[in-house]
Image (tube, grey):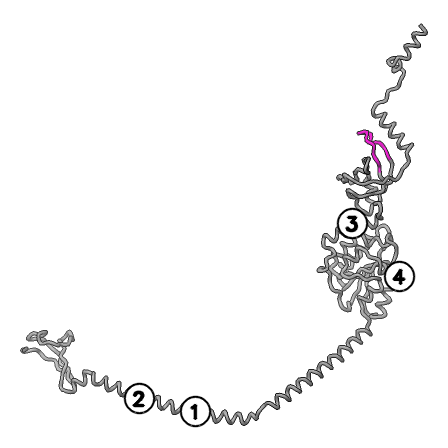
Amino acid sequence: MLRRSAIDSDLPLLAAQKRKFLTISELSDLIKRTLETQLDALWVQGEISNFRVPPSGHFYFTLKDDKSQISAVMFRRQGSLLRFTPENGMAVLCFGRVSLYSPRGDLQLYVDDLEPQGQGALALAFEQLKNKLAAEGLFAQERKRTLPFLPESIGIVTSDKGAALHDILRIIRDRYPDRRVVLRPVKVQGDGAAQEIADGIAELNRLGTVDVIIVGRGGGSLEDLWAFNEEIVARAIYDSVVPVISAVGHEIDYTISDFVADQRAPTPTAAAEMVVPRKTDLVEQVELLEDQLLKNIEFKLATLREACASLAKRLADPGRKLRENQQRLDELSVDLSRRFQEKLRQLKDRLAQGAGRLAALSPLAVLERGYSITHKFPEQRIVKNAAELATGDRVRITFAQGNALCRVEEKE
């Protein structure tokens, strides 16, 4: 019996009675704990694909190379700290931990930080935002305005503790100390700096008394200047009614603000020089223009004198010309009178001839020669034939002098 029991104990069915079975959930938890305790956080390189952002704001994507792939997630809080926007096809370095997503049993990389491979995150973010705003037309040259000449009031958005403000004020005081300066102090780097800069630009616009705004700071690293690469600052400059000069860093530094602003200054000092030109330079320019104007006037006068002298030489005695014209006028008057009299005589002759012919044809002339005209009365119809009358008809006979009313006694 003891021998049989020993043999039976080796059978799988009997052995299973002594084993502990795991549920799927327990197995998942075991794998998850093992991965999280045995595998430290690590950097992983790969290419992003299937990138998507649901309403939750989390980043979901697949990280792959030419042979394998793994699902990855970056939660909204970590994702909001990124300077750039991940895109499909982007080669990246991911820092995170590997764990198991228990509901589906999927192996997943939980990403805490993300960097573009081969290119800094800030440089990539700069290019992405630059391309986006350029596509929207924020950099268009046709919308940029000309800076006012000698503005009465100058707005400045910068730190009140930086060297940039000192340089700007020094230039303004040296050139035009009577110019009004309105300072809106702001943070120029660190958390919240971009929002303060944007608010400062908007406040100076609402103030309504400044003619131009200088926005900027002194030099620094790309990280130090980053507030001027934020979209909120770019849009505040674009929305400004007052012309804006961007004066950020040194001459080699370029920020998004430089592309949006109406004018870019290589340094804060140069921005002040753009706003208020040197008074002595203006005086010299005015004097130069005055000299040039006087020379032009003198040259013009000399040219006109020469032209007048030339015309005077070619001009004949106006009195002689006048006398000639008067004589010609007299001749024309005599000729006109003669022609008029001749024409009048011709018309009189034609009138007399016409009157004679008309008199010859007049019935009155016939009457003067002893003839008369007989009208049947009372019809007043001329009687041309005696047959038209009957004995007893009344007729009116018209003589050269007077009329007679008669009665027909007899006709032949």
Name the disc covering residue 348, or none: 2
Q: Disc 3 versus disc 2: distance between alpha carbons?
A: 107 Å
Sequence order check: which comes first, mark 1 or mark 4? 4
Give yes or no for residue 109 being in the magenta stretch: yes
> In front: 77, or 40?
40
> In front: 105, or 243?
105
Sequence order check: which comes first, mark 3 or mark 2? 3
**Residue most extreme to the front:** 66
Name the residue type under label 3: Gln
Name the residue type under label 1: Ser
Proximity of marks 3 and 2: CB atoms separated by less than 8 Å: no
**Residue most extreme to the top:** 1
Q: Which residue is mark 4?
A: 163
What kind of element bears circle 3? helix
- Give the x, y percent position of residue 178: 82, 70
Q: Which residues are magenta?
A: 98-110
- Quarter that holds the N terminus: top right
Alpha-carbon neighbours of circle 1 within 10 Å: few (<14), some, or many (≥20)?
A: few
Sequence order check: which comes first, mark 1 or mark 3? 3
